[in-house]
Image (cartoon, rainbow, N blue to C red):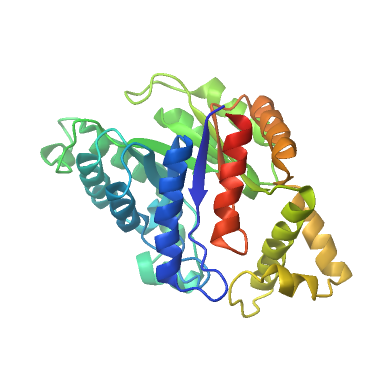
């Protein structure tokens, strides 16, 4: 089974954004040592609890401190940017770190409406233009603009010997169809979607077109997972994340994920308990054997080429340990 890491660069209680970003680099190094296939870092805006607003900057830092693990954005939120600039940025990364760069492409705002306006003006209009933006970006990445079009006269320099590999990320059939029509790899966010993911992934595979990129359809399924030595320890770690997410969703001040000690002294309301049970449905929580079994079942259900794991716990040590335990159990 191929496993990879998705990092959201969480700023934990008592820690700073600088701490979070340094720990992200350490997580990538840990993943490389353990044998994870790739490390992706997400893009968020105006989230005090998440430190990565510019994945492309972090990838330069992480690439320089690793040697072989594939690294990428999960994802660059394309409606905020011009395709040519994205292509230049990732071509430069692919020049610095040959045959290691992935370019995940997403359409979510990644933050508040005000942040979206500050970034790119009319976000909804840019989303509507997303199909054209994807095609434009791919032409720049493959340097294959038709000669009768204006942009055929320019190249997204520096042009690398091996192009970044584009992945379209999504949680709906629309994203699957876009990936299939454009001939890109597809990453489905199981941990973020309430829809029939298997049907969505099957739609991608059945309608995939080879348009000059990858030869055959490739699928990553992303899942939120927390692993600890015992089921009880994993459940406590997960509860810390659940309560933090509930606070954020309510618009309450969130100073980072609460510690295990804070959670043990917290009285959960019936409303919060219902929300926790809903979130649990999209997570894998348990000891190494339990987590392995559920990951194997998930891979089989989707017939996925790879499983990507996002893990947020109240300490960077327990996050790292979760990835270590999973790797040791599976490999």
Is 245 situated above or below 319?
below
Residue 182 position by quadrant: top left
Name, please, the residue furthest toward the left.
153
Question: Quarter-wise, where is residue 67 in the image?
Answer: top left
* Image quadrant occupied by the C terminus: top right
For residue 239, above or below residue 128 = below
- Residue positioned most to the right: 270
- Left or right: residue 102 versus residue 241 is left
**Any part of residue 171 in sight:** no
- Can you say which quadrant of the picture contains the N terminus? top right
Where in the figure is residue 127, as x and y percent of width and height? 45, 53
Q: How many marks?
A: 0
Q: Residue at x 57, y 73 (%)?
A: 13
Q: Position of residue 250 (x, y in %)?
A: 69, 74
The residue nearer to you, when weighing 274 against 263, is 263
Report whether 2 appears left or right of 150: right
Is residue 108 at all visible to an observer of this figure?
A: yes
Which residue is depicted at the point 74% across and 55% down? Answer: 233
The residue depicted at 30 percent of the width and 58 percent of the height is 57
Q: Nearer the viewer, residue 258 or 134?
A: 258
In the shown orientation, is residue 111 left or right of residue 189? left
Q: Where is 265 relative to 273, above or below?
A: below
Camera-side residue: 278 or 114?
A: 278
Q: Position of residue 305 (x, y in %)?
A: 54, 26
The structure residue drawn at horizontal position 57% and vertical position 37%, both measured from the top left corner, is 327
């Amino acid at each position: 089974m191929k496993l990879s890491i998705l990092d959201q660069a969480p700023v934990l209680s008592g820690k700073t954004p600088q701490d979070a970003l340094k720990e992200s680099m350490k997580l990538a190094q840990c993943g490389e040592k353990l044998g994870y296939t790739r490390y992706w870092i997400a893009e968020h805006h105006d989230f005090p609890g998440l430190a990565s607003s510019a994945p492309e900057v972090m990838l330069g830092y992480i690439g320089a401190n690793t040697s072989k693990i594939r690294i990428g954005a999960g994802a660059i939120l394309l409606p905020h940017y011009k395709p040519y600039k994205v292509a230049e940025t990732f071509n430069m990364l692919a020049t610095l770190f040959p045959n290691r760069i992935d370019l995940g492409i997403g359409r979510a705002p990644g933050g508040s409406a005000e942040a979206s306006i500050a970034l790119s003006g009319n976000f909804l209009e840019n989303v509507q233009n997303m199909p054209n933006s994807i095609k434009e970006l791919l032409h720049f990445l493959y340097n294959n603009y038709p000669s009768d079009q204006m942009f055929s006269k320019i190249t997204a320099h520096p042009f690398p010997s091996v192009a970044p590999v584009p992945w379209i990320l999504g949680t709906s059939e629309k994203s699957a169809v876009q990936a299939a029509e454009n001939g890109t790899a597809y990453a489905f966010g199981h941990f973020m979607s309430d829809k029939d993911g298997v049907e969505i992934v099957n739609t991608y595979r059945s309608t995939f077109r080879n348009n000059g990129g990858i030869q055959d359809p490739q699928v990553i399924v992303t899942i939120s997972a927390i692993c600890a030595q015992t089921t009880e320890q994993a459940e406590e770690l997960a509860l810390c994340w659940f309560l933090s997410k509930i606070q954020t969703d309510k618009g309450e001040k969130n100073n980072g994920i609460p510690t295990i000690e804070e959670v043990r002294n917290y009285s959960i309301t019936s409303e919060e308990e219902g929300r926790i049970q809903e979130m649990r449905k999209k997570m894998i929580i348990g000891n190494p054997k339990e987590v392995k079994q559920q990951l194997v079942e998930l891979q089989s259900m989707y017939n996925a080429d790879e499983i990507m794991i996002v893990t947020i716990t109240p300490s960077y040590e327990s996050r790292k340990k979760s990835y270590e335990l999973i790797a040791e159990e599976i490999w």
